[in-house]
Image (cartoon, helix red, strand yellow):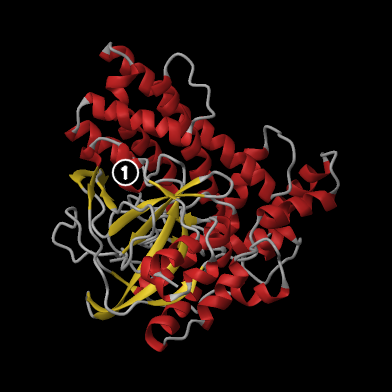
Amino acid sequence: MTKGKEIIETGWNLDNSYARLPKIFFTSLNLNPVPSPKLIILNHPLAISLGLNDQMLQSNDGVAVLAGNQVPEGALPLAQAYAGHQFGHFTMLGDGRALLLGEQITPQGERFDIQLKGSGRTPYSRGGDGRAALGPMLREYIISEAMHGIGIATTRSLAVVTTGESIIRDTVLPGAILTRVAASHLRVGTFQYASKWGSVEDLRALADYTLQRHFSDVDTGDNRYLSLLQEVVKRQAALIAKWQLVGFIHGVMNTDNMTISGETIDYGPCAFMDTYDPATVFSSIDIHGRYAYGNQPDIAAWNLARFAETLLPLLDVNQEQAVKLAQDAVSDFVELYRGHWLAGMRAKLGIFNQEPEDESLIEGLLRMMQKYREDYTNTFRALTFDERSDTALFGTTEFAQWHELWQARLGRQQESKNLSYQLMQNSNPAIIPRNHRVEEALEAAVKQGDYSVMERLLSVLSKPYAHSPEQAEYSTLPEPSACPYRTFCGT
């Protein structure tokens, strides 16, 4: 069988709409082949949903594509240009270690970016080697698929291959490439790049492309670019609320890591919160807590303000009116976010309708959880089954009083208690990718070449609302440690 025929039979159906934007937005590139690619993990359900033949992807030619050694039919490899505020400081960026192969058109007519992460140097590498290590790529695979299982909009992971190369970081590590699937890789930083280094027509072309790609079903009314801003605000409000509801901490909410599509992207120093504390930070580089759990909604609003600034030339010819339109649109974020968060919290507590006192009921529980240093996920899990676990909180008079108020609140609904608890089971994950479990899986994979630990973890994370017996062991907390858990940017 010829290579060309095998690539076709793999199911690649690539288009390259991004490459039809003005040349300022990307650089076309050749591949950076690796010496000895080996498939480590393949996301079979995702491959099939994309219209790909998962068996052919495991062949030598299939792996060659996933490793960046072979160009699939229809691909036009390129690196995207973008900018961003990194910890509040604006800088020129771009795909420094990634290639966009193209956009896979699925059998359902959907369009998804296929990107190779860790594929080598690009003009935007800024002195880096453009490669990635196995651990961070597997970490992104685990967390992104866990987020998908929870029901949070996210980029996804199709595959991880090792390259046969050694990557020099603080130590020598095995090299790897992740195949990332995204609704697109358009970012706030893409618009910042256009605003800073492009013309107004470049900016308009980008905005028009974004509207067509992500918001073609939206009635844009008289001001299509205001509608673009409003739709992005809506999607981010919904996304950040879902992060907060499950205790997810992104860790590096720079503007280049906020997508226009509303998907979570970039799983570098991210982690899930154990003990409830709004000040929780895991990232080793976030020394001032800019991206702490409790700050994420405010940072999202700040990022959206930067997005709005880029659109000012398109919003209105009158600068003063453009600014007002932008400010009004961004200011909607707070109310939209709060509405999503309250609705989600009500669901987590089995509440179907709305009462004015709901917010104080919710805040009262969170205050107690923080005071008694309770685990966020397990507290809601215990409430879901009305269990009193052996923790500091559940034996207190404070909790007993709160519990009485909560039960009375449930009793004022038309829905039965059984329906309330069913709602809670569907709203409170039994498990999250606990930090110590993720590290356990990565250590077995990277140091021993044992991928079974990761495979078992992925299996239970794929159905987080099952509340099955085999998930129980994955809900246990790590052993107490004098050293706080720290995450690092995936380099």
Residue 312 spot, x, y in % from top left: 29, 22
Question: Is residue 352 toward the left or the right of residue 253 in the image?
Answer: right
The image quadrant of residue 471 is bottom right
Asked if 198 appears above or below 58 in the picture, the reply is above
Residue 354 spot, x, y in % from top left: 71, 34
Residue placed furthest toward the left? 127
Characterize the local packing of mark 1: few (<14), some (14-19) or many (20 or more) Cα atoms within 10 angstroms: many
Asked if residue 486 shows in the view, the reply is no
Question: Is residue 412 toward the left or the right of residue 84 in the image?
Answer: right
Helix or strand or loop: what does disc 1 sit on?
helix
Give the labeled residue for mark 1.
255
What amino acid type should be assigned to the residue bearing mark 1?
Answer: Thr
Q: Quadrant of the C terminus?
A: bottom left
Asked if 223 appears above or below 56 in the picture, the reply is above
Q: Quadrant of the N terminus?
A: bottom left
Residue placed furthest toward the front? 1
Asked if 350 appears above or below 202 in the picture, the reply is below
Residue 208 spot, x, y in % from top left: 37, 28
